[in-house]
């Protein structure tokens, strides 16, 4: 697909449009960072006020699921960085393979998360009538666990869909490798990774010592 | 602008190795940091466990931002946006904790 | 002559279609990504929401004629003031100036053909509409009674009203805000025409930029706060519940972290409008352009550091309260600088009192009263006395209504000729402006007294000795309502019968006046090139000559 066809109003040159798209996504990522930070502030308040029960609950998360998923998402982020940078350098095959890897790894994360959630529910770690822990602050931990991982998973799913779409269109040559969309999606995906990098110690490594 | 935007740079045949090099090296470092933070989590450091874990997480996030997200080579404006986000998050935490950490009784 | 760049293949000025002619079907309006049409879509929706919010409070003010109420149940009363707050804040005030005048004018003022992401712009209107529909559903299904502030634990655990639908509506509309902020920031950075450097930008553009910073950084925190309410109320996840250890103040910290900067979203664009109008109708350059810029950015930034002044009596630590109080005094300084600079701009001006100028001058006076009473509230001892009373209600209405709504009407009249190509009837417009000023003060000044004397806000009933003030306020509100109903009539009348406006009926500076009224779809037939700064109504250092009316030097000739 020609580069000219990827040009949109009101832009007159694709590099300028691409720069604008990159700035736009960075600004949006800043807002996403503030979004998650609000929830993490709630986590921080609760942990500060009820450390004992909060950390006792934190020990109940499955550190292996968490760690494996962290590495999976880091690798997916690596793949996406390769896809975007290879695309920039017009290395078509490398870019497509990397996009495919990023999608597969993203899906793996979701599948593992699904298994983890099932185990959490079986262990009665969802706050409600049959909640397993009675210490003050324990239910708070799991409220934040479910909200933070759930909202993160939603963001991740959106990312997987976007990357899959890129892979499809680029492989059919409907999308040029220089398109701003690859760069924009990559930056979004890296933020999803960064959020998880922050959540990992907060949700999986707390209270272990 | 100090550097031509990516899309106008002529694609160079030998660029694949340099792309692999920096991203792979970053990935290896990231995985090592995950293993490090995992190990340190089980070490009884008392009140230091949380700060240590957060510092390692910050280092990982910085690596992703600087290398994968090309913050180092991109426009300074992008660094400003990222910095602004961090600054405002810091404000939120500092002022909110000025309340919760200083309540009487 | 400037070195203007000619667009190839375009016909000379006058024979091109305006943006209004490019597609006359409803479908063309609903699918247009032209920023000017999106602006008009927003104008239509905010007008509808304005009258819904106004209708709700009309019922409340009628009810408050009697100390014991007249025709509303307690429940209905709570739902009506909640409706008023939610609709007015999120579906009228926040989008009012940025999404109508900002959308229409920002690209034009910088010499661009559109915003950076036109499709995102149109999508943001649909998001706003979807949010509004969710909220209206909440109303029709029976209403919400938590107040626009959604305080927990009432909203999460005890209210038997449609909190989830209302929270969802505001959540969705929040994304329209964020999209708008992103669009405006990128547009300002990337689409300024040749010669339009940052310090040549009109102050309305700077105001929109500062507003966009707040939109982008504050709104997501509101979104996550509403999400946490939904998680607790709908999914039963304890977050704010004190029985499980939740901190009662956590909600308030999160909510006000957004909602205080939100008031700057509402007032910064208004300040931008005021500068545009005052410079034009005083025929003066703005006094202290650079400080006006710094003040806008300072207000946007420092506005994020003061939210705890809403929580002085909520149980917040004294230490934090003192910090927030101090910072709240600091944030008043850049606002005061702006008021000083507007006043100084008038000095040695050739002042005329067309409707936009009446509204703009009204803004300066009423915003000052609102701002000074804000300082009273920033002082902890005073706030302890008047928190949650009508004093606070009066304070923020002086800013939101006396300030922002006045500026909205200033903008509406100032740019009406540009947007529609028609001139409105000046006599009716001046009458409406003056009526509005008096109606406004009769409505809200008594409320300062009420609050000081101890009348709490949001109360359905009140002690009989306060009745005289409530009646004054209701009478004032009736006058204000009449004043609001006038502009729709004479403005719509002007569409059919008004004189046609030329490119520049006011003799104003600014690139938007260098093209036809109404403008063509691509805004300019010839890409403008800027060689001068803004507001060049006279030579630097000159006073205007008393006898003759100064016409400015144009910024670029086609």
Image (cartoon, rainbow, N blue to C red):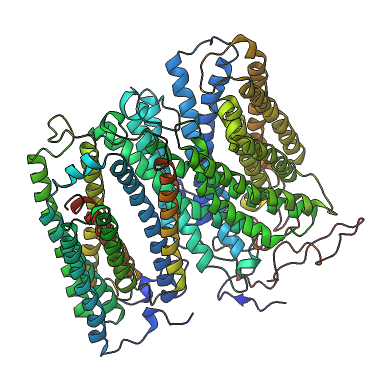
- Height in image: C478 above or below A44? above
The quarter of the picture where residue A17 lies is: bottom left
Q: What percent of the width, then of the height, locates residue C358?
A: 74, 41
- Height in image: C318 above or below C184? above
- Height in image: B77 above or below C462? below
Q: Nearer the viewer, residue B10 or C363?
A: C363
Residue drawn at x 58%, y 56% is C297
Left or right for C294, reference A124:
right
Residue drawn at x 65%, y 49% is C333
Residue drawn at x 37%, y 79% is B6
The quarter of the picture where residue C171 lies is: top left
Residue drawn at x 48%, y 42% is C320
**Quadrant location of the N terminus of chain C in the rendered image:** bottom right
Left or right for C95, reference C482:
left
Furthest residue to the right? Answer: C547
Q: What percent of the width, then of the height, locates residue C46?
A: 51, 40
Left or right for C478, reference C229:
right
Q: What percent of the width, then of the height, locates residue B68?
A: 29, 72
Q: Nearer the viewer, residue A38 or C358?
A: A38
- Height in image: C451 above or below C432? above
User: How many numbered circles are shown?
Assistant: 0
Q: What percent of the width, then of the height, locates residue C103?
A: 53, 53
């Amino acid at each position: 697909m020609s580069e000219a066809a990827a040009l949109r109003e009101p832009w007159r040159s694709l590099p300028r449009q691409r720069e604008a798209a990159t700035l736009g996504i960075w600004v949006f990522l800043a807002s996403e960072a503030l979004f998650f930070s609000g929830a993490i502030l709630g986590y921080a308040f609760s942990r500060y006020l009820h450390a004992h029960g909060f950390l006792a609950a934190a020990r109940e998360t499955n550190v292996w699921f968490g760690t494996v998923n962290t590495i999976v998402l880091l690798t997916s982020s690596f793949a996406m960085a390769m896809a975007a940078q290879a695309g920039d350098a017009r290395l078509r095959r490398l870019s497509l393979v990397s996009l495919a890897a990023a999608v597969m790894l993203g899906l793996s994360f979701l599948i593992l998360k699904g298994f983890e959630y099932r185990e959490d529910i079986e262990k009665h770690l969802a706050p409600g009538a049959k909640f397993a822990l009675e210490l003050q602050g324990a239910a708070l931990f799991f409220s934040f666990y479910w909200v933070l991982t759930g909202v993160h998973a939603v963001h991740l799913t959106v990312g997987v869909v976007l990357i899959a779409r890129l892979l499809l269109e680029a492989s059919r040559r409907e999308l040029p490798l220089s398109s701003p969309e690859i760069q924009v999606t990559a930056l979004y995906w890296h933020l999803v990774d960064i959020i998880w990098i922050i959540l990992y110690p907060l949700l999986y490594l707390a209270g272990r010592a | 602008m100090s550097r031509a935007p990516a899309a106008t740079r002529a694609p160079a045949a030998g660029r694949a190795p340099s792309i692999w090099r920096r991203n792979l090296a970053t990935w290896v470092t990231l995985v090592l940091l995950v293993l490090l933070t995992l190990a340190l989590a089980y070490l009884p450091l008392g009140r230091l466990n949380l700060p240590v874990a957060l510092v390692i997480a910050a280092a990982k996030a910085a690596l992703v931002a600087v290398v994968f997200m090309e913050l180092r080579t991109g426009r300074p404006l992008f660094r400003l946006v990222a910095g602004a986000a961090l600054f405002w998050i810091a404000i939120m935490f500092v002022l909110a904790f000025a309340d919760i950490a200083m309540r009487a009784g | 002559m400037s070195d203007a760049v000619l667009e190839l293949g375009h016909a000379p000025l006058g024979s091109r279609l305006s943006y209004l002619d490019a597609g006359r079907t409803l479908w063309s309006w609903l699918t247009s990504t032209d920023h000017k049409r999106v602006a008009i879509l927003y104008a239509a929706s905010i007008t509808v929401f304005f009258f819904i919010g106004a209708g709700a409070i009309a019922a409340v003010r009628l009810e408050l004629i009697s100390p014991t109420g007249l025709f509303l149940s307690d429940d209905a009363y709570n739902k009506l003031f909640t409706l008023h707050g939610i609709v007015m804040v999120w579906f009228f005030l926040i989008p009012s100036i940025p999404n109508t005048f900002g959308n229409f004018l920002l690209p034009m003022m910088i010499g661009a053909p559109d915003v950076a992401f036109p499709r995102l712009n149109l999508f943001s209107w649909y998001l706003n509409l979807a949010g509004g529909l969710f909220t209206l559903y909440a109303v029709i299904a029976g209403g919400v009674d938590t107040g626009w502030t959604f305080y927990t634990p009432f909203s999460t655990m005890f209210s038997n009203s449609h909190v989830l639908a209302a929270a969802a509506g505001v959540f969705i509309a929040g994304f329209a805000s964020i999209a708008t902020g992103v669009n405006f920031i990128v547009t300002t950075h990337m689409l300024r025409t040749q010669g339009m450097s940052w310090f040549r930008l009109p102050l309305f553009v700077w105001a929109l930029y500062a507003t966009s910073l707040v939109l982008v950084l504050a709104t997501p925190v509101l979104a996550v706060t509403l999400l946490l309410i939904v998680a607790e109320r709908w999914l039963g996840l304890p977050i704010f519940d004190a029985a499980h250890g939740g901190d009662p103040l956590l909600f308030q910290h999160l909510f006000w972290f957004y909602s205080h900067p939100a008031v700057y979203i509402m007032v910064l664009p208004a300040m931008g409008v005021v500068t545009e109008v005052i410079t034009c109708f005083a025929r003066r350059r703005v006094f202290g352009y650079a400080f006006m810029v710094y003040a806008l950015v300072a207000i946007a930034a420092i506005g994020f550091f003061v939210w705890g002044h809403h929580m002085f009596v909520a149980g917040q630590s004294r230490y934090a309260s003192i910090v927030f109080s101090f910072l709240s005094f600091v944030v008043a300084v850049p606002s005061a600088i702006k008021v000083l600079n507007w006043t100084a701009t008038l000095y040695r001006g050739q002042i005329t009192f067309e409707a936009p100028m009446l509204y703009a001058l009204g803004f300066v006076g009423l915003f000052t009263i609102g701002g000074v009473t804000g300082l009273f509230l920033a002082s902890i001892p005073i706030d302890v006395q008047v928190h949650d009373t009508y004093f606070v209600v009066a304070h923020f209405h002086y800013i939101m209504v006396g300030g922002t709504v006045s500026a909205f009407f200033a903008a509406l009249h100032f740019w009406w000729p540009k947007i529609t190509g028609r001139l409105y009837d000046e006599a009716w417009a001046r009458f409406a402006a003056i009526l509005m000023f008096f109606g406004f003060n009769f409505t809200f000044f008594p409320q300062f007294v009420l609050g000081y004397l101890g009348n709490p806000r949001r109360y359905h009933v009140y002690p009989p000795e306060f009745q005289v003030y409530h009646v004054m306020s209701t009478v004032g509100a009736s006058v204000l309502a009449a004043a609001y109903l006038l502009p729709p009539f004479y403005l719509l009348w002007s569409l059919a019968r008004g004189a046609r406006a030329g490119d520049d009926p006011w003799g104003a500076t600014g690139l938007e006046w260098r093209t036809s009224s109404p403008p063509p779809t691509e805004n300019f037939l010839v890409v403008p090139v800027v060689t001068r700064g803004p507001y060049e109504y006279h030579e630097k250092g000159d006073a205007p000559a008393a006898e003759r009316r100064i016409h400015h030097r144009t910024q670029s000739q086609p």
